[in-house]
């Protein structure tokens, strides 16, 4: 696993030792950033179910200003911390050890907003609809912000106006789908 583009291009990321963490493949990550755009200058990023931190770290490499990475697993947070340090992004990263639902509630109470929110939940959780609802309820996206969720292709994205976030695009890559939502 490597950073694909930007200031840390080609730098290797540490991977998980256990199968509990399933990193986004380089192919899907590359497709995701091709869809979102190559440069993220000045954006604030939220990475839910951060795992290795690859999505947020890729965004930082492409110019994002700061990133909040959320995971409940100690191994995942340690990987995020180590990967951020290895790439020189430790000062731009905030780690939260909590559930995604609680993180959304907390960040919403604090009035925090993000231009880009990533979510890559374990496919077995079938959490796509809940994630859209949590992000919307906490008002985490800025006006032009994007929520990008990686999920199993068998899980259908919520309707066009789920909780005030509108499905703007959905693409399939083998067993993986990427769905994009923005404030309506």
Image: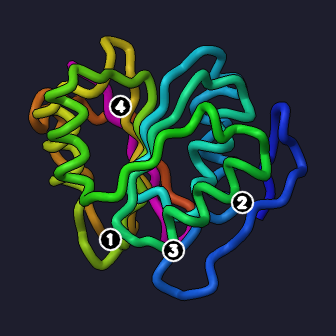
Q: Quadrant of the N terminus?
A: bottom right
User: Mark 1 and mark 3: span between their CA atoms?
Assistant: 28 Å
Q: Are there few (<14), some (14-19), or many (20+) residues within 10 Å of tag 3?
A: some
Secondary element under disc 4, as helix, strand or loop, is strand
Q: Position of residue 62 (x, y in %)?
A: 72, 29
User: Mark 4 and mark 1: span between their CA atoms?
Assistant: 18 Å
Q: Position of residue 59 (x, y in %)?
A: 63, 35
Residue designated by label 3? 75
Tell me: 86 left or right of 123.
right
Q: Nearer the viewer, mark 1 or mark 3?
A: 3
Residue designated by label 1? 154
* Residue 26, disc: 2
Whether residue 2 appears in magenta in the rendering, the answer is: no
Q: First in sequence: mark 3 or mark 4? A: 3
Q: Position of residue 139 (x, y in %)?
A: 19, 25
Secondary element under disc 2, as helix, strand or loop, is helix
Residue 138's image quarter? Answer: top left
User: Mark 4 and mark 2: span between their CA atoms?
Assistant: 23 Å
């Amino acid at each position: 696993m490597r950073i694909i583009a930007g200031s840390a291009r080609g730098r290797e990321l540490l991977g998980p030792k256990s199968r509990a963490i399933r990193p986004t493949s380089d192919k899907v990550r590359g497709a995701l950033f091709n869809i979102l755009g190559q440069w993220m200058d000045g954006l604030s990023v939220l990475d839910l179910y951060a795992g290795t931190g690859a999505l947020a770290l890729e965004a930082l490499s492409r110019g994002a200003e700061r990133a909040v990475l959320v995971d409940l697993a100690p191994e995942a947070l340690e990987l995020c911390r180590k990967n951020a340090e290895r790439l020189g992004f430790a000062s731009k990263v905030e780690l939260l050890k909590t559930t995604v639902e609680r993180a959304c509630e907390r960040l919403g109470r604090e009035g925090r907003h993000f231009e880009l929110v990533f979510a890559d939940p374990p496919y077995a959780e079938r959490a796509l609809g809940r994630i859209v609802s949590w992000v919307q309820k906490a008002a985490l996206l800025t006006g032009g912000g994007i929520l990008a969720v990686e999920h199993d292709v068998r899980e259908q994205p919520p309707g066009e106006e789920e909780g005030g976030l509108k499905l703007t695009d959905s693409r399939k890559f083998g067993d993986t789908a990427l769905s994009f939502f923005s404030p309506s």
